[in-house]
Image (cartoon, rainbow, N blue to C red):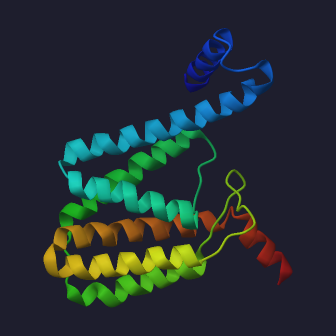
Amino acid sequence: MNKFLCRYLVEMLLQFREVSEDEKSIYLYGTQILLEKVENLLCIFFFIIIYRSWIEGILFIVIYTVLRKEGGGYHAKTPMKCVLCTIIITNLFFLFLEFSLLKIESMPLFVLLLFLIYIIAPVDSFNNPLNGNYKKNKLLVILIMLACAYAFFLIENEKIANAIFMIVCIYITMLIMGIKDSPRYRRSNKLD
């Protein structure tokens, strides 16, 4: 269905001379990626509406997207698996959010998880390789900001602190799942 829709949209662009025949494959690929991202966001918003957790849902989208962009992680091999993975992750996030509230004693565990992210990341994949000039400085700033936000919300709003904690837990799971397919980690294992 997606391929048909993407082809149709690109054919429309060709028909109106907005795209040349040489650019057709690039626009087809870009349209497919855009449509996959829209599908994933619609799935997330579906769960935001079902669970009626707007603030936590927006936090999930923002924090998880930034972490994924900077640190990589597991990438599904097909768009259908990607949507399925998004549905599972988002549903788990909201389910776990309902059942647990963390206390101030969880701060050391949270800092440990952030440290693990810093050590493990980036995790690339064959369909999303590293661009060659990856620097961990940006990731470190993001992780420090997350730690500060978490500490603040532990005192001010435990439900939001819990959401941040769950997002980090889900993200580190995706990082670890991505290691097996990561060309970066395969190269380092071959060197040993």
Residue found at x 45% / y 36%: 39
Is 182 placed above or below 83 here? below
Q: Up-down: is 119 above or below 85?
A: below
What's the residue at 28%, 85% (across, down)? 106
Residue at image coords 32%, 81%: 148
Residue 12: x %, y % from top left: 61, 13
When asked about the image quadrant of residue 123, the answer is bottom right
Q: Quadrant of residue 131?
A: bottom right
Q: How many marks?
A: 0
Quadrant of the image for the C terminus? bottom right
Question: Taking the image as drawn, is residue 28 in sight?
Answer: yes
Residue appearing at x 59%, y 73% in the figure? 121
Residue reaching furthest to the left: 156
Decide if residue 102 is in sight here. no
Q: Quadrant of the N terminus?
A: top right
> Horizontally, is 13 left or right of 61 in the view?
right
Q: Is residue 58 left or right of 35 when viewed as pictured? A: left
**Does residue 11 lie above or below 44 as drawn?**
above
Q: Residue furthest top?
A: 15
Q: Position of residue 120 (x, y in %)?
A: 59, 77
The location of residue 91, given as percent across then percent down, is 32, 51
- Relative to residue 68, is residue 30 depicted above or below? above
